[in-house]
Image (cartoon, rainbow, N blue to C red):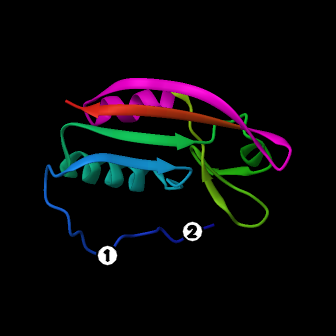
Amino acid sequence: MNYPAPRAQGNSFSKDTIDVVYARSALHLFDEEIDEFLTTTKILLKTGGYLMVQGKPNENYKIQRSREVNPNLCVNGDGRIRRLWNEENINKLVNKIGFKLVRLERTTEKWRNKDSHFISFIAQKI
């Protein structure tokens, strides 16, 4: 299956002007698109700025009811695409862009009376 890639049109930000980029359960992108997002983030963040991401690990029930369509990318029966996050791919991404991993943690929240698992990280541009 081919799924359309979300694309931002234009960019009104200048290089080295952003303090923090935050994404919570929002980066449901193929690897190439994640690379593009991270490259843009690195350009826009000030030195010392932070990238903060929260996503769903394999233990999340929404991931478990989905099927993998690409490495680290799943789709459920409704056609919703979700990125699978884990310590290994987070470390690879952070190292690839030359950031310092500041924090990596797993948390659990209740959503519709179910445990919903998340993995979060904070990385700093050095």
The local crowd at label 1, few if under 14, some if 14 to 19, many if 20 or more residues have their Cα within 10 Å, is few
Q: Which residues are magenta?
A: 88-116
Report the mark closest to the observer, 2 or 1. 1
| Tag 2: amino acid | Tyr
Q: Identity of the amino acid at label 1?
A: Gln
Look at the image and say whether residue 93 sits in the magenta stretch. yes
Counting from the top left corner in percent of width and height, residue 112 is at 83, 50
Going by the picture, which residue comes out furthest to the bottom? 9
Q: Quadrant of residue 69?
A: bottom right
Q: Check disc 1 and report the residue beneath it.
A: 9
Rendered location of residue 47, percent (x, y): 16, 37
Residue displayed at 46% across by 32% down: 121
Which residue corresponds to mark 2? 3
Q: Nearer the viewer, residue 73 or 98?
A: 98
Closer to the N terminus: mark 2 or mark 1? 2
Would residue 46 appear left or right of 117 to someone viewing this image? left
Mark 2, other Cα within 10 Å: few <14 / some 14–19 / many ≥20: few
Which residue: 35% across, 53% down? 37
Q: How many marks?
A: 2
Q: Quadrant of the C terminus?
A: top left
